Image (spheres, rainbow, N blue to C red):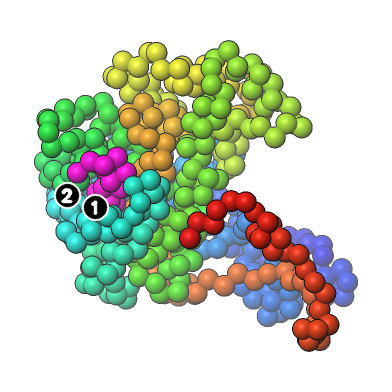
C-alpha cells in the first residue's frame, strides 16, 4: 500500500487492487497531524496494525503536550520545569483538573477540601490485616483503592458531574493516606492519622515516618522535594497506565475501579517500576570499583545488561523533568548529610560519567527522571518497594483528569475495542478424544520438586 499527501486529506492506495481511499487529516493546536482512521474499515475492509499504539492517537486531549524530540512537557500550556519551580502540587492538581491555574480564593478552597478528606473510612483499616505483612505495597494499595467504591456510594454515578468531582477530589486526598498505611502495615507500625495543619506532601511524610512514641520533626527541604516529585509525576500524556484508565473508564466503570486499573498497569517494571530498577541496578554493580566493568557491558551491544535510568523512550533530546529533580535530589542529600552511603556515591559517579562520557553524550543517554527519583526517595528513607507507590500518588491526578475529560466528551466517548491481526489456525474439524496425539505440556509441573504453594 502506498500513500501520498493531498491538502487536508491523505490518499491511501491499495497496490493489490489499485483502489484509492481518501483519509481526512486532523490538526491539533500543536504537534504532529493525525490521520482520521475511524472509517477505514468501513470503506476498505482493512484495519491498521500498530503494536503498542506507538503511531496511534487513541483520543483527543487538552491536558498534556509532549514533544520528545525537543524535550518539551507542558500541562495545559505551562512548562513542567516552570510549574515545578514556581508552583506546588495542589496548584498543579487544580490546573490539570480544571484547565486553569487557581485564583487565591479558589486555591484556598481547593486545598481545604482535599485536606479535610484525607482520612479514610475506619473500616478500611481492617482491610490491611487481611494481607500478608510482606505483601508489596502496590498489591495492597490497588486492592484498597478498588474497594473504595464499596464505601463511597455517593460518588460512583459517572453521569453526575457533582459525583464525578467528589470522586476525583477524594481519590487525590486519600491516595497518600492509603500509601502511608500500606507502608506502616509492612513494617509493623501503627497507622498514623492525617494532620490537617500540614501541606499535602508534608502530611504524607508525617503519616509515613512519624510514630506515636515521639515527636516527628518535619524537614521543609524534604517536604518541598516530595512536593516536586509529585508535580513531576502528575501526568505524562497517554502512557500505559493512563491509557488503561481511559480504556477501563470507556466501559462505564466507576472511578475507583478505573484508578485501581491504572495502578495495576503502573506497577509493571517497564512503567512505574523504572526507578525501582535503578536502585536494583546500583545494588548489582555494588561498588564504584566495578563501574568500569558495567560501563563496558552497557556499551557492548551483545551484552544484555542495560544501564537503568538513562535515556527515555519518549524524550530523544533530554527529559525536562530530570534537571528539576536532579537539583531536588542533591538538596535532599545535602539536607540529610549523606556523604558515605555507598549506593548513593555509586549513583553520583554514574551520573558524572553519563554527563561526560562521549558514548553517552553522543547517544543522549542522559540521566532521566527515574534515575534521580530513585536516588532521592531512597535517601529520604523509603524502601524500594514503596517507589512505585509514590509514583501512584503523584500520577493519580493525571489519571483522574484524563478519565474526567473522556467521560465529559460524550461525542467522542466509545467503549475501547482494539482490533487485531489474526495469525492463528483457520477453520478445522473437531477431533474426538481417541484421535488426538499426546502432549507433554504438563511435565514441567508434575516433575517439579518444588512444593506447590496453595
Question: Foreground: 311 or 437?
Answer: 437
Q: Judge left or right: residue 408 versus residue 281.
A: left
Residue 129: give x, y in percent of width and height: 27, 55
Element at label 1? helix
Q: Is residue 351 above or below residue 22?
A: above
Label 2 crowding class (10 Å Cα cut-off): few <14, some 14-19, many 20+? many
Q: Position of residue 383 (x, y in %)?
A: 38, 35
Observer able to see residue 395: no
The answer to which quarter of the image holds residue 326 is: top left
Question: What residue is disc 1 on?
Answer: 173
Which residue is drawn at the image coordinates 78% and 86% (left, top)?
Answer: 432
User: Residue at coordinates 25% horizontally, 53% vertically from top-left?
Assistant: 174
Residue positioned 77% across, 68% down in the render: 439
Q: Earlier in the sequence, mark 1 or mark 2?
A: 2
In depth, the one of 257 and 318 nearer the eye is: 257
Q: Is residue 173 magenta?
A: yes
415 vs 144, left or right, is right
- The number of numbered badges drawn on the structure is 2
The answer to whether residue 358 is visible is yes
Q: Nearer the viewer, residue 154 or 295?
A: 295
| Residue at mark 2 | 115
Q: Are marks 1 and 2 in contact (CB under 8 Å)?
A: yes
Residue 257 image point, x, y percent: 37, 65
Q: Secondary structure at mark 2?
A: helix
Magenta range: 172-190
Whether 300 is drawn above or below 247: the answer is above
Amino acid at each position: 500500500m502506498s500513500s501520498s499527501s493531498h491538502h487536508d486529506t491523505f490518499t491511501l492506495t491499495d497496490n493489490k487492487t489499485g483502489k484509492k481511499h481518501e483519509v481526512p487529516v486532523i490538526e491539533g493546536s500543536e504537534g504532529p497531524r493525525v490521520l482520521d482512521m475511524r472509517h477505514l474499515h468501513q470503506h476498505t475492509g482493512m484495519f491498521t496494525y500498530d503494536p503498542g499504539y506507538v503511531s496511534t492517537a487513541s483520543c483527543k486531549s487538552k491536558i498534556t503536550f509532549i514533544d520528545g524530540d525537543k524535550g518539551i512537557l507542558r500541562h495545559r500550556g505551562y512548562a513542567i520545569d516552570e510549574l515545578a519551580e514556581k508552583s506546588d502540587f495542589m496548584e498543579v492538581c487544580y490546573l490539570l483538573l480544571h484547565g486553569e491555574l487557581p485564583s487565591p480564593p479558589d486555591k484556598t478552597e481547593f486545598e481545604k477540601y482535599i485536606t479535610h478528606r484525607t482520612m479514610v473510612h475506619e473500616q478500611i483499616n481492617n482491610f490491611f490485616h487481611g494481607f500478608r505483612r510482606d505483601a508489596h505495597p502496590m498489591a495492597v494499595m490497588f486492592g484498597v483503592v478498588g474497594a473504595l467504591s464499596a464505601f463511597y456510594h455517593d460518588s460512583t454515578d459517572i453521569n453526575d458531574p457533582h459525583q464525578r468531582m467528589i470522586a476525583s477530589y477524594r481519590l487525590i486526598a486519600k491516595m497518600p493516606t492509603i500509601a502511608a498505611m500500606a507502608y506502616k502495615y509492612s513494617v509493623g507500625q501503627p497507622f498514623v492519622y492525617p494532620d490537617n495543619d500540614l501541606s499535602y506532601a508534608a502530611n504524607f511524610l508525617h503519616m509515613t515516618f512519624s510514630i506515636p512514641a515521639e515527636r516527628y520533626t518535619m524537614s521543609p527541604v524534604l517536604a518541598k522535594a516530595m512536593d516536586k516529585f509529585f508535580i513531576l509525576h502528575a501526568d505524562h500524556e497517554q502512557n500505559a497506565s493512563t491509557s488503561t484508565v481511559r480504556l477501563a473508564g470507556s466501559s462505564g466503570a466507576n472511578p475507583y475501579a478505573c484508578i485501581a486499573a491504572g495502578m495495576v498497569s503502573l506497577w509493571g517494571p517497564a512503567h512505574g517500576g523504572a526507578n525501582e530498577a535503578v536502585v536494583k541496578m546500583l545494588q548489582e554493580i555494588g561498588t564504584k570499583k566495578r563501574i568500569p566493568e558495567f560501563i563496558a557491558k552497557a556499551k557492548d551491544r551483545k551484552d544484555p545488561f542495560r544501564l537503568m535510568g538513562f535515556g527515555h523512550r519518549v524524550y530523544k533530546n533530554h527529559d525536562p523533568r530530570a534537571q528539576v529533580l536532579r537539583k531536588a535530589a542533591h538538596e535532599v542529600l545535602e539536607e540529610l548529610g549523606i556523604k558515605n552511603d555507598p549506593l548513593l556515591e555509586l549513583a553520583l559517579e554514574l551520573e558524572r560519567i553519563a554527563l561526560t562520557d562521549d558514548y553517552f553524550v553522543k547517544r543522549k543517554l542522559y540521566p532521566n527522571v527515574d534515575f534521580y527519583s530513585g536516588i532521592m526517595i531512597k535517601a529520604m528513607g523509603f524502601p524500594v518497594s514503596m517507589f512505585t507507590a509514590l509514583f501512584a500518588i503523584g500520577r493519580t491526578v493525571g489519571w483522574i483528569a484524563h478519565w474526567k475529560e473522556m467521560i465529559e466528551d460524550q461525542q467522542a466517548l466509545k467503549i475501547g475495542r482494539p482490533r487485531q491481526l489474526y495469525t492463528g489456525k483457520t477453520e478445522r474439524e473437531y477431533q474426538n478424544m481417541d484421535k488426538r496425539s499426546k502432549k507433554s505440556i504438563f511435565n514441567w509441573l508434575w516433575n517439579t520438586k518444588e512444593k506447590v504453594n496453595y
